[in-house]
Amino acid sequence: EEFVDAAFSHVGLRWQDHVLHDKMLFRPSDIHEVQANPTKAERDLGWKAKYSMVDVVRMMIESEMSRKG
């Protein structure tokens, strides 16, 4: 939901006005909320993300829009 919200917000829309969902299609094993802690990757691997999820969504949309011309 956060990803979809970021994508729709980037183009000035509310996702709730355009997306329908059917709870019957949800899998019972789906995790409802996922939160990651990148501390271990940074500590053990020396890796740190350069971009936030919102940044990645923005780059994806801008790339797609530039291809559509």
Image (tube, grey):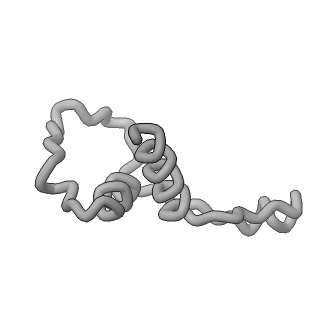
What is the x, y in percent for residue 44? 87, 61
Of the pair 68 and 17, the residue shown nearer to us: 68
**At x 16% / y 56%, what residue is drawn?**
16
Residue closest to the eye, 6 or 25: 6
In the image, residue 50 sits, relative to residue 24, either above or below, namely below
Q: Relative to residue 26, is residue 2 drawn left or right?
A: right
Q: Quadrant of residue 30?
A: top left
Count of numbered marks: 0
Question: Image check: 37 left or right of 18?
Answer: right
Q: Residue at x 70, y 65 (%)?
A: 50
Q: x and y percent of residue 43 in the render?
A: 85, 67
Q: Residue at x 40, y 55 (%)?
A: 3
Q: Is residue 31 above or below residue 2?
A: above
The N terminus, quarter of image: bottom left
In what quadrant of the picture does the C terminus appear?
Answer: top left
Residue at 11% across, 54% down: 17
* In-front residue for pair 28/6: 6
| Front residue (pair 7, 66) | 66
